[in-house]
Amino acid sequence: MRIAEAASRSGLGIDTIRYYEKSGILPEIRRGTDKQRRFSVENIEWLTLLYWLRETGMPMKTMHRFATLYHTGDHTIPLRKEILLEHSEHLKKRRTDLDHCEKMLAYKLSIYKDYEK
Amino acid sequence: MRIAEAASRSGLGIDTIRYYEKSGILPEIRRGTDKQRRFSVENIEWLTLLYWLRETGMPMKTMHRFATLYHTGDHTIPLRKEILLEHSEHLKKRRTDLDHCEKMLAYKLSIYKDYEK
DNA sequence: CCTTGACCTGAAGCAACTCCAGCTTGGTAC
DNA sequence: GTACCAAGCTGGAGTTGCTTCAGGTCAAGG
């Protein structure tokens, strides 16, 4: 499939996909005779993973490291595991941030309530 | 209190505070005879609010709008309320993103488990 | 008086996109 | 078969939101 579909399936934007390819966090994407990118199902899976990692705040440097490890072979699995576990911890931190912010907003809104109408 | 303390109390960095002031999302900060910034308790409260809004993904444009409204007077409270409510919605979205990503990570890690050692 | 530490400013640098101008290419429409 | 259009391509500029840096001020301690 082509880039437009890859974008809509993965969640990333077209430009972001091209940018990611240039940055080296995608494997080489096959090209058709027309020199346009053709994405495989595995490509889409990878893009989707990147989408969620980005969405939850993983920096590109880490994604890059993860991609390189992935490419290097199965013996890097412990390292990759470590990266994902660390990201899990990061998600926990984010969740408590959300909790905190939600409480704060609720409080602010409760004050504003008094001024209603 | 001075900028270093304001930073450590609010959570923002020193440079970020100066940047926010330049960007117009802070009220004018009082200066001492030495021309250095002196932060009031209200200043710190405002900075802390901004810290949490930023931490949970509010764009500066929105913060700016909020700051301007705040400065304009009490009759803008409905508008400010709207911004905060919208941000609450945004937090909900973030939370489901976290859920989604956590599930994905758990799945990935369960696959890696087989390769253990 | 000299140094040290905290602070100042304006400007450059950086991450991660995002948009743009100008150019192929393949497909349909006359 | 050629005219046109959508979708894709590239290299490069622009944007957001900080972050770092170079060079300078100021007050206090030794």
Image (cartoon, coloured by chain):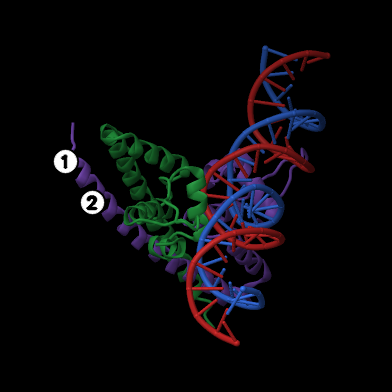
Chain colours: A green, B purple, C red, D blue
Mark 2 is surrounded, within 10 Å at the Cα level, by few (under 14), some (14 to 19) or many (20 or more) other residues, namely: few
Mark 1 is surrounded, within 10 Å at the Cα level, by few (under 14), some (14 to 19) or many (20 or more) other residues, namely: few
**Which of pointers 2 and 1 indicates the residue nearer the eye?**
1
Inter-mark Cα distance, 2 to 1: 12 Å
Residue hosting label 2: B107
Work out whether residue B28 or residue A88 is closer to the camera in this orientation and state it.
A88
Q: Are marks 2 and 1 in contact (CB under 8 Å)?
A: no
Q: Chain of mark 2?
A: B
Residue B33 is situated, as x and y percent measured from the top left of the image, at 78, 40
**Does A53 sit left or right of B40 as displayed?**
left
Residue hosting label 1: B114
**D22 versus B95 height, above or below:** above
Amino acid type, mark 1: Asp
Image quadrant assignment for residue B45: bottom right
Q: Give the residue drawn at x 26%, y 32%.
A: A75
Work out whether residue A67 or residue B97 is closer to the camera in this orientation and state it.
A67
SS assignment at label 1:
loop
Marks 2 & 1 on one chain:
yes
**Does B42 sit left or right of A109 as displayed?**
right
In which quadrant will I find the C terminus of chain B? top left
Is residue B1 visible in the rendered image? The answer is no
Residue A48 is situated, as x and y percent measured from the top left of the image, at 37, 56
Residue B101, numbered label: none
Work out whether residue B95 or residue A4 is closer to the camera in this orientation and state it.
A4
**C11 versus B55 height, above or below:** above
Residue C3 is situated, as x and y percent measured from the top left of the image, at 72, 15
Image quadrant assignment for residue C23: bottom right
**A42 versus A73 height, above or below:** below
Answer with mark 2 or mark 1, whichever residue precedes in sequence.
2
Q: Give the residue drawn at x 26%, y 34%.
A: A78
SS assignment at label 2:
helix
